[in-house]
Image (tube, rainbow, N blue to C red):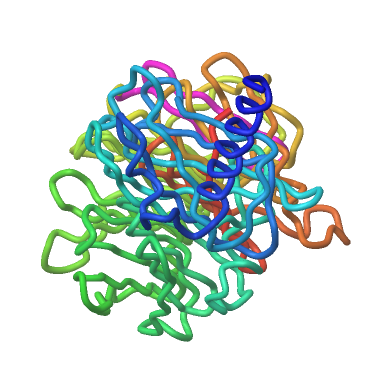
Amino acid sequence: MMSMNMQTTQRVFMLFFLLCVVLPACADDSLCSWVSGGCLELTVTGQGTFDNLEIQLVDQNATSPPNGSSRIGTTFSSGDKIRVPAPAQETTARFSRLNVRARRGSEIVMGSTDISWPDGEHVPAAVRLRGACADGWCRENPPESGEGLPRAKLEAVWASSAQDVWAVNDAGLAFHYDGTNWKTYTDASGSILYGLFGSTPSNVWAVGSNGTAYQFDGQHWHPKPTGRAEALTSVWIAPDSKVWAVGEGGIILYHDGAVWKSSAESGILTAELLFSVHGTGPADIWAIGAGETILHYDGVTWTKKILSGKTTSTYLASLWLEQSNPGNGWAVGDNNTYLTLSNGQWRVDSSGLQVGIGSGIWGSSAGGVWAGGCDLRIVHHNGNSWQLSRTESLLENRDDFCKHHLISMFGTSQINVWAVGTDGYILRYGYWID
């Protein structure tokens, strides 16, 4: 009799537990009221029915290994609430990001959201799961974002946080993401916007065809005429607030806070098209471009640098510099060209993967560099070697080799990296960390 009573009690407990997991609320309308140590009342939304739910808790900079709990085999639907107890012996206040991964049939879906979880508290959290994900990268648009962004070629991306992301395209449109929705700005409609960079959410610059330049002041985009007809391909803001832009014919311009001025070396050092400009300070700025052109500014003059080693590249497209370690960085170009900058000297790096690299690059440290290439391929350098992500699987259709490629990359932390490219593709990294 005692054995039967125990079995009955266990079944009742399991039934109560399952009801608390999959129903919108428990009898007292609180999933967490009977959990000690605090828990998340997680609401997951998305299309379809999901199972194999996994949860990952990370701090914003991912400076320590992710921690969390998993509930394997649980089946749930969009809108269900799920009880997530605090991990044992963890200080939950240090977590600021919640990643969720599950399966929808044969597809892996992911979601992520910022959280504030004071120690011992019961707090709500909501995550929208999205499909088309691979190795922590998810396709934002198209097709699941639902914002109806145009499929035009996206030329550049920049962000100050996960809630402040900008992208520009070849139709003169700027798009802003506030962490939930995209908003379209038509201020520069008709121009091709190639370059994008900001120093704060209220100081963002874009440059493009026919000498086009715009500044966003936190509310609107305003034209900043350069008086030049050359296409401007890249823009960067130095810590002294001077805005630098480069482009067609070796043009080098800077905005001193009032007007645009031409550098004395503009068009003199090279007549090649300059594709990218970036720096670590007012006296350490680099520009790269066609013909393996590499230029450096020391705060007084621009000089032309020699590349150590021989490549087959016809142009260098994008560069990233270690902000905390001047004189070090990376650059990529066409024909699978990788360059490393070490102590102020550029050299060819032959260890890169053959994935058609020739577009965007960004890093958070020497051991966390991302680069994008053909067919949405993305490679990651972990400090020792390059590794290929499975992002090629995020293509809707692969009809022609290298028809779709990633042009620009930018991030604000190891768990908030963005990549944009042809046909309106937007990819974001940080949904899951393996």
Q: Residue at 61% of width from left, 21% of height from top? A: 349
Q: Is 401 displayed left or right of 167 in the figure?
A: right
**Is residue 73 in sight in this rendering?**
yes
- Location of the C terminus by quadrant is top right
Give x and y (percent) for residue 207. 38, 67
Give x and y (percent) for residue 335. 72, 39
Q: Nearer the viewer, residue 241 or 104?
A: 104
Give the vertical position of 8 relative to 134 (above or below).
above
Give the vertical position of 37 relative to 378 (above or below).
above
Give x and y (percent) for residue 150. 58, 78
Q: Residue at 61% of width from left, 57% of height from top? A: 130
Q: Nearer the viewer, residue 390 or 423?
A: 390
Asked if residue 103 is among those painted magenta in the image, a careful observer would answer no
Q: Residue at 53% of width from left, 76% of height from top? A: 147
**Is residue 332 in sight in this rendering?**
no
- Location of the N terminus by quadrant is top right
Q: Nearer the viewer, residue 90 or 396?
A: 90
Q: Residue at 40% of width from left, 48% of height from top? A: 31
Give x and y (percent) for residue 314. 66, 44
| Extreme-front residue of the structure | 1
Q: Is 68 displayed left or right of 198 in the figure?
A: right
Residue span colored magenta: 326-344
Q: How many marks?
A: 0
Give the vertical position of 72 relative to 105 (above or below).
above
Q: Is 205 displayed left or right of 168 in the figure?
A: left
